[in-house]
Structure formats: C-alpha cells, structure tokens
Image: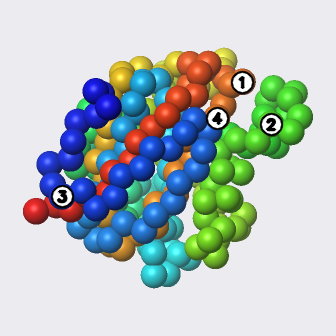
C-alpha cells in the first residue's frame, strides 16, 4: 500500500485491521508495534498489559505525570500501575495522541447520543482480550492514538469532546515493548462524534524487530 512506510527492521508479523474491528497480540520485549493510520483521521484505541502477569496494566496517571502532558508523542513512555515501562513511543509521525477521552461503548453511546445497541471500542476490547483470559474488570482508561481531544485553558472540553483527527494518511506510531506486553487495539467504529471524521477506515499493524 502506497501510504505505508516499511519498518526499519525485520517484520515478524503484519496485519490489516478492518474499520471497527479489534486486534490483540503479545509484543516481546524490544520488539516494536507499528500502528499505521492508512487513510488518515482514524482513531485507534489502545490498552496494554504485562503479558506474563496482566494484573499489571496501563495506568494513565503514572503515564501523564511522567510525561508532564496530556498528549503522548515521541519519547513518552506508557507506564503501568506499578510505575514500570510497558511501551515507549520511539517514533511518531503524528504527535499529540489523546489520553483522556477513553473508549466509546454501547452504554456511553446511549448516554451521550441516545442511540441504542451501538457497540464501540469497549466491546471490541472485550472481544480481543477474551482469548487472553481478560474481561470487563481488566478495562482501564486507554490511550487513543491519532485522536484529537483538546482541553481549553479553563479546563473545558469541546462540545463533541473529540474533534476531527488531524492524522494524515500514512501516519504511524512505533511502540517499543519495554517488557513482554499484551497490546489490545480497537480500530474505532464511532460515527456519533467526529473522532473518525465520519468514516471509520482500515489500519495496519506491524510487529518488527529492532536491530
Ligand atoms: Zn471508539
């Protein structure tokens, strides 16, 4: 595909994730997960866990306190509740990834938009993590790659919370695993707010080896 910049090391796995679908895989320490927004303006919800002991998992406050920003970019580390590094963003052509908007879900779609039976990323997370023995109790506030959730000076959020993503076709983020880590992805299906600019699209993931 023309928009894809190939990883700079051996590719161990590559997979295309259709719009609105989930994905999960264990990334070994020092391997890198590349997530590519093939067509642009696509939100990608992300959770991660210690693969060997998944009660240790992504922790937003530790991550934000270490980064001293609400928005993730190159050089930032995703920390666990035990304040250990799960993944570090070693390359990023987008920048400013959201950490506060959380995942969409059937209940929140009903609450916010009055739509019934409209599943979202939470349901995708549940589907993707089930084979790894994880369930509802394991879902915590997640990172939203390529999502645009501005916070205004008075602390207010936008009327739609999510604004259209500024991600361009081919934007990617490289996440180096700092321990053997389970990565869980939802390629967001949301149509009730502009986080996918009204058109969920395909993404691609690579797992590649750093040399
Ligand atoms: Zn979503």
Looking at this view, name the residue that lies furthest to the left. 211
- CA–CA distance in space, label 4 to label 2: 10 Å
Q: Residue at x 66, y 51 (%)?
A: 124
Whether residue 200 is visible here, answered yes or no, is yes
C-beta proximity under 8 Å, tags 2 and 3? no
Q: Which residue is mark 2?
A: 118
Whether residue 154 is visible here, answered yes or no, is no
Where 202 sits versus 47, above or below?
above
C-beta proximity under 8 Å, tags 2 and 1? yes
Q: Which residue is mark 1?
A: 192
Measured from the top left, where is residue 34 in percent x and y? 32, 48
Q: Would residue 7 appear left or right of 153 to someone viewing this image?
A: left
C-beta proximity under 8 Å, tags 4 and 2? no
Q: Residues within 10 Å of mark 3 (few under 14, many from 20)?
A: few
Where 186 sits versus 32, above or below?
above
SS at badge 3: loop
Foreground residue among 203 and 186: 203
Q: Residues within 10 Å of mark 4 (few under 14, many from 20)?
A: many
Q: Would residue 123 appear left or right of 49 to someone viewing this image?
A: right
Q: Residue at x 39, y 61 (%)?
A: 79
For the C terminus, which image quadrant? bottom left
């Amino acid at each position: 595909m023309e928009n894809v910049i190939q990883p700079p090391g051996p590719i161990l796995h590559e997979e295309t994730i259709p719009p609105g679908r989930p994905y999960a895989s264990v990334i070994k320490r020092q391997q890198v997960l590349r997530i590519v927004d093939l067509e642009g303006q696509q939100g990608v919800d992300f959770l991660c866990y210690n693969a060997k002991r998944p009660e240790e998992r992504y922790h937003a406050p530790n991550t934000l306190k270490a980064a001293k920003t609400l928005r993730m970019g190159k050089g930032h580390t995703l920390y666990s509740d035990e304040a250990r590094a799960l993944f570090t963003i070693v390359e990023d052509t987008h920048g400013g990834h959201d950490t506060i908007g959380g995942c969409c879900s059937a209940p929140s779609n009903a609450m916010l938009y009055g739509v019934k039976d409209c599943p979202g990323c939470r349901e995708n997370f549940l589907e993707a993590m089930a084979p790894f023995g994880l369930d509802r109790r394991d879902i915590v506030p997640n990172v939203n790659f390529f999502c645009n959730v501005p916070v205004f000076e008075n602390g207010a959020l936008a009327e739609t919370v999510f604004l259209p993503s500024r991600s361009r076709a081919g934007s990617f983020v490289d996440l180096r695993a700092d321990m053997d880590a389970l990565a869980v992805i939802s390629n967001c299906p949301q149509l009730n707010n502009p986080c996918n600019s009204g058109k969920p699209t395909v993404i691609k993931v690579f797992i590649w080896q750093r040399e």
